Amino acid sequence: MSLIARAPALAPFRIRSFRFQWPADLLASWAFEMEGVILGWFVLVSTGSVLALAVFGSLQFLGTLISPLFGMAGDRIGNRNVLLLMRLAYLILALCLTALFLSGLAAPVPVFILATVMGLVRPSDITMRNLLVGETMPADYLMRAMGVSRTTADSARIVGALSGAALVAALGSGLAYVAVCAVYAVCLSLTFGVGIRRLRVVSDGETMPTALGALRQGFAYVWSTPVVRAVMLLAFLVNFAAYPLTGSLLAYVAKDVYGMNQTGLGWLIAFFAGGALTGSIMVSMYGAHIRPGRTMIVSALVWMSLNLVFSWLTTPPLGEIVLFVSGFFQSFCMIPMAVILLRVTNPALRGCVMGVRMLAVYGLPLGLLLSGPLVEWTGFSATGSFYSLLGLFFTVSIALWWRTDLWDRAAPVNAR
């Protein structure tokens, strides 16, 4: 038997485009995480403010406001071309940050400015990845392909976080950023090998709508399709209520709750990512047996319940265990969510709809901006409890309101 026959999770690698896209996405994700550790710790130490850390984390998602434009650009000039331009921008910005650190001119203000520019581009990277997978992958490989694709981000939170912390400790921020630039350069070169299949070609008698018209068309489709609307609301909710506690705020937990240094922060991130990677691998192996709608709802509820527990833990070993399990259920929530959207969306509108989906990520910077002052006023435990209980309440509400679309066994989104 061939390796792919014995390991069904490897089936997507039959597609040549995916053999280039997966390592390119993997390296991009590694570089993102390395930068997150380097810059997040720099901001926290140089300012001494959890509010500044929350603002910095929010800037990384500023581009969610313009994500639909990236999706529409992909419909016009090709998703691979858009992704190439984005990854060239990452490399240029990383070179600028390298120059700042090596010259000794790094300070919160220029770092915040460059983070703002990067935040306009980077949030749409996952959108373009998913669109390329949806374009190039046969339908029977889609769930497995999304699971394997998700491992790029999950493994990056382990490798990127630990390597970023280790490089800073051993070499300093400047030389650590040289490594980040090298990773981005290899990522860019691999992206040239990704396929350029187009799902929709405009005929001679057809004109493309304007950017604003296409955006209205995408929003109208989302609003008029109940299952898509429900998934979008749940996506916004988990970004607002779940991700802040296991994202940028982990730097605060490591430093002020657990008394750790940046290496300890790397380990916290790695435990969450290790659980997420395990979950992604499980989805890629057993995706054919998963009912996406039900799995998404149940996993969201378990994830937020674990966040509630994590909010009150004060010992690193217990916190790391809970983070691992939280990461596992996070994958079982987010991968089916992406698969549902790729399955039910009209291919002609897929780029715009996936761009609108990225607007849901704006819940994360909103949640971070609110969490900063809440942590300073009430503490991490109270803030985490508020976010988790809010998330649980609205997840149950979404499941009940759209139960025929998301929960019924016969619903299209629960087809295996």
Image (tube, grey):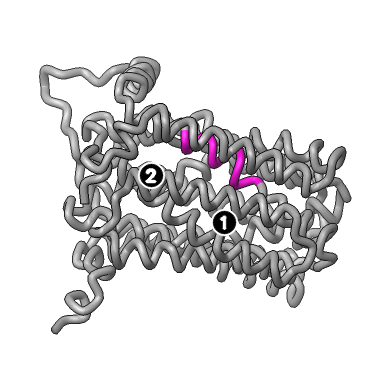
Tell me which corner region of the image, top left, top right, bottom left or bottom right, holds residue 414.
top left
Pinpoint residue 351: horizontal percent, then vertical percent. Answer: 32, 34
Residue located beneath label 2 in the image: 337
**The N terminus sits in image quarter:** bottom left
Looking at the image, residue 259 sits to the left or right of residue 164; the answer is right
Residue 198 lies in the magenta stretch: no
Q: Which three-letter amino acid code belongs to the residue tagged 1?
A: Phe
Please name the predominant secondary structure of the magenta segment in the image: helix
The CA distance from mark 1 to mark 2 is 23 Å
Q: Which residues are magenta?
A: 234-244
Pinpoint residue 382: horizontal percent, then vertical percent. Answer: 78, 43
Pinpoint residue 296: horizontal percent, then vertical percent. Answer: 40, 47
Nearer-N-terminus badge (1/2): 1
Query: Where 408 sits versus 186, above or below?
Result: above
Q: Secondary structure at mark 2?
A: helix
Looking at the image, residue 142 sits to the left or right of residue 21; the answer is left
Q: Which three-letter amino acid code belongs to the residue tagged 2?
A: Met
